[in-house]
Image: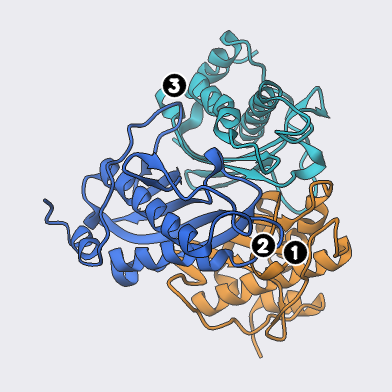
Chain colours: A blue, B orange, C cyan
Amino acid sequence: MTNSAVEKRLSDAGFTLPVAPAPQGSYVPVVVVGTVAYCSGVLPMSGGTLVAKGRLGVDISIDEAREGAQLAALGLLANLKAAIGDLDKVARVARLGGFVASSPDFTDQPEVINAASDLMVVAFGEDGRHARAAVGVAVLPRGVAVELEATFILK
Amino acid sequence: MTNSAVEKRLSDAGFTLPVAPAPQGSYVPVVVVGTVAYCSGVLPMSGGTLVAKGRLGVDISIDEAREGAQLAALGLLANLKAAIGDLDKVARVARLGGFVASSPDFTDQPEVINAASDLMVVAFGEDGRHARAAVGVAVLPRGVAVELEATFILK
Amino acid sequence: MTNSAVEKRLSDAGFTLPVAPAPQGSYVPVVVVGTVAYCSGVLPMSGGTLVAKGRLGVDISIDEAREGAQLAALGLLANLKAAIGDLDKVARVARLGGFVASSPDFTDQPEVINAASDLMVVAFGEDGRHARAAVGVAVLPRGVAVELEATFILK
């Protein structure tokens, strides 16, 4: 249960925050400095398992990758909530970086990352509109199709 | 017409700012938070049409891609002007991220992105010198050869 | 000789800061704005020569690339020291961006970039834990296997 307005909007739209995985290694999911939260790259997970594996243009569809982008976006928000306690403390989504594992002839990276961008607006309304870069990379960790990183501004 | 010193320097060097395209989708061209302007990735456009398509090492030359990098840089500045009203409000170009669609044997990404870096110095003088990362990606949205994102510091 | 606690920790762990290369072109190794230091992408160098060339999954091993990641991390720190004078002025490593030149079937980018992340913790202790994105790109400048960029927060 939560009284968070952000989580209620996500829930009303059918989205559930995952459990943030425990940090591992020398990097951390989120670094908060003043009012800036730098968030590590997140891979799409569902029920603790990596999903949305493959490369666009080879062996995963745009729709499957868009679902992966939504899951990665939810993972970003879960990590942020674990770091700051309450997503209602977010003042603005400043930047979203979207990496899409792509064959050289797949050029619809924006359609994939739009699913994550739209989710930010579901969660934060106008404050969810962000600067964004979407690029097509050769391959991503563990063979997933999408990785997202983000910078949030806190109240 | 403009009294902007930045635009006069660009004009004197033969560069013209394009019309900033209307924002579309859940992301926005620029997010301004305090004195930091986060700018979305920009593709090379000329007269409202995407140009500089192809991949380095395959079907576009370094010179053509450098022209694309200049056009993407002008697009960044057009977006920034639309967001803040006057490019003379820029205190510093903090960071430029350059993505170059490349075949695995093309390793001259810096030469391509240098055209964008040089343009920032044309526009802003010493304040245009920036931190930069240039990488070679598999493919970029819509098949263009270059994408640029940037962070500016405002006065 | 240095009295820097950071450099002593690096030295005790067997690491030596390289000489920062002279800046060239229209970009600079580091832009400092207030307490934020934006650092340009760094390639692995040893004795003034580029090393760790190749692509993961093709012609360089994970161990060789990890050594390259350490050298690139040391290059970042050398550039930062040249810009701010003393690495003890670092309050926090905010973000590390790691690009790994990869064939489409190599998916262990995190193992490569972990070597750089671990070095940040050697240098800065808990303040060295950072947000991070690691992706696999088609190719990097000059054919190296690893490129790192970073954002540091200063005291």
- Find disc 2 in the rendering and name its residue: B140
Q: Chain of mark 3?
A: C
Q: Position of residue A77 (x, y in %)?
A: 32, 51
Q: From this viewpoint, is residue B38 visible? A: no
At mark 3, the secondary structure is: helix
Residue sitting at the far front: A59
- Find disc 3 in the rendering and name its residue: C125
Q: Chain of mark 2?
A: B
- Find disc 1 in the rendering and name its residue: B145
Q: Identity of the amino acid at label 3?
A: Gly
Q: Identity of the amino acid at label 2?
A: Leu
Say above or below: A35 vs B14: above
Q: Position of residue B110 (x, y in %)?
A: 79, 51
Looking at the rendered structure, whether the residues under marks 2 and 3 are on a common chain is answered as: no
In this picture, residue C48 sits left or right of residue A122 = right
Q: Quadrant of the C terminus of chain A?
A: bottom left
Are the residues at dot 1 and dot 2 in contact (C-beta closer than 8 Å)?
A: yes
Looking at the rendered structure, whether the residues under marks 1 and 2 are on a common chain is answered as: yes
Q: Identity of the amino acid at label 1?
A: Ala
Which quarter of the figure has residue B150? bottom right
Residue drawn at x 69%, y 40% is C102
